[in-house]
Image (cartoon, rainbow, N blue to C red):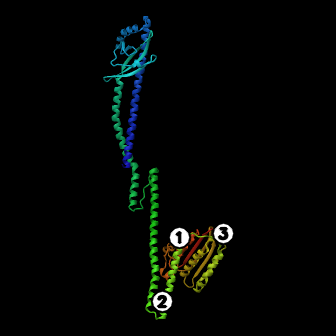
Amino acid sequence: MRLFWKLFCSMVMIAALVCALSGFVLIDGQFRAGMGARAELAMTENTLLRRTLLRELQFSGGLDRDAAVNLTEQSFSAAERRGISFRLTDSQGRALAGSRLPVESSLSQVLDEEYQGWEVLQNHGRYYLLASSPLRLDGEVVYLENWREVGDLFALRAEQYHVFFYLLMALILLSALSALVLSAWLSRPLIRLSEAARRMAAGELFQRVELRGDDELCRLSRDFNQMAEQLEQKVEELTETARRQQDFLRSFAHETKTPLTSVIGYAELILSRPGQQELVQESAACIFREGRRLEGLSRKLLDLIVLEHEGICLRPVEMPGFLEQIAGVMRPGLEQAGICFEVHFEPGTASIEPDLMESVCLNLLDNARKAVPEGGRIRLDGVQTAEGYCIRVEDNGVGISEEDLARVTEPFYMADKSRSRTQGGSGLGLAVCQRIVALHGGRLTFESEVGHGTKAGVWLKGGAGT
């Protein structure tokens, strides 16, 4: 059953039950109050009759049973004309004198000899309220009983029940209409949630639910929107990851295909012309060069895979000496290429793994060398910062476009593929650098402008000035 109908049926049933119980309690309470008043009146009449009978017996000089019976026979006719019916009975309930009761009563048989009582009797659709009290006469107990018809109370109750039945039907109809509107209002947010969920299941992850109010359903809608945003974000991340993996595999296949094609081609050339010594040497040199390129590619791939699964051991290192050693490695090659190499190191220490961090710095400097033409400039700085130590590599080379700058750390991505392949690049260096810096708890940043150069920064934490 749908929630709409559950709400509707529940509200109608609750309204009907509450109205029915309330009406029953009200009518029954009114009936009991009326019956209680009639009973009190009957008991009062019984008390007055008993006192009158005892007084008359005392005046006549006899307090025995026979005198009471005679007195009752003499006075009950006059009492009936005034609307009062009464009689005397023995302890077995047999009538001794007085008016005739239309229905048999056993009240005198159950009453205590010291107390009064009353009961309601029915005979052929007529109701009587009978009051009885004991009367002790010379050691013998008789009972004085009087009664009145109370059928009007039962008729009134039946009429009230009849009227209330139609009133209850009207109240149920009104509550059904109200429940219909209320159920539609309460279930509308759930319908919107269900519709949004179906659309999301069909692939429309941008679906959101309109928020109205601040109740539990609104909070549920807000939670649904947050879930949808997280799901959409995760799907976008998975899609981007899948795209990068596909690009990685495509680039890997392309990068290995080129040197393998060269190796196979030159090997066939050597086999087909073994007598041409100069051609053999040239082909062997090309095979050696492409083989070294494949070796470098496989080594960087292995580094990237290993770094994804293993941690590193850090230790404090004096950064000026560390950077000076790196500058010494790069200086001869840069000077030979006609590139101005500037260095500046501030005192400070950082917790690093020296071999891995050296690989990062050499890679950044080598990328700068490839981007700078003869007569260009490269600067290596070590700067103490508030959060640690920063290694900066700045050049005035060709620069990187904004679109390429956002992807330079992706595996196999090369901003200038033709230049990178000519100079031996594979597009894996910066991906390895970024992973190494991340393992150090730092971050790798790039700033670049096409035609004006690039700034690369390695921001390390935990440095201290000396």
CA separation, marks 3 and 1? 29 Å
The answer to whether residue 459 is visible is: yes
Dot 1: what SS? helix
Which badge, 1 or 2, comes first in the chain's sequence?
2
> Most extreme residue toward the top, as rendered?
61
The residue lying at 40 percent from left, 34 percent from top is: 22
Q: Residue furthest left?
A: 124
Disc ID at residue 308: 1
Mark 2 sits on what residue?
283
- As drawn, 331 above or below 310: below
Counting other residues with Cα less than 10 Å from the Cα at mark 2, is it few (<14), some (14-19), or many (20 or more)?
many
Labels 3, 2: front one = 2
Locate residue 46: give its quadrant.
Answer: top left
Along the line of sight, the residue nearer the viewer: 254 or 53: 254
Asked which quadrant contains residue 36, the reply is top left
Residue holding disc 3 = 464
Badge 3 crowding class, 10 Å Cα cut-off, few under 14, some 14 to 19, many 20 or more, is some
Q: Amino acid at mark 1?
A: Glu
Q: In 3D space, how far apart are the residues under numbered discs 3 and 2 (Cα atoms)?
A: 54 Å
Asked which secondary structure carries label 2, the reply is helix
What is the three-letter code of the residue carrying label 2?
A: Ser
Quick one: label 3 or label 2, which is nearer the N terminus? 2
Q: Residues within 10 Å of mark 1 (few under 14, many from 20)?
A: few
- Where in the figure is residue 40, as x and y percent of width and height? 42, 21
Instruction: Identify the mark nearer the N-term, 3 or 1.
Output: 1
Q: Are marks 3 and 1 in contact (CB under 8 Å)?
A: no
Relative vertical location of residue 417 with respect to residue 74 in this rendering, above or below: below
The residue type indicated by label 3 comes to Ala
* Secondary structure of the residue carrying numbered label 3: loop
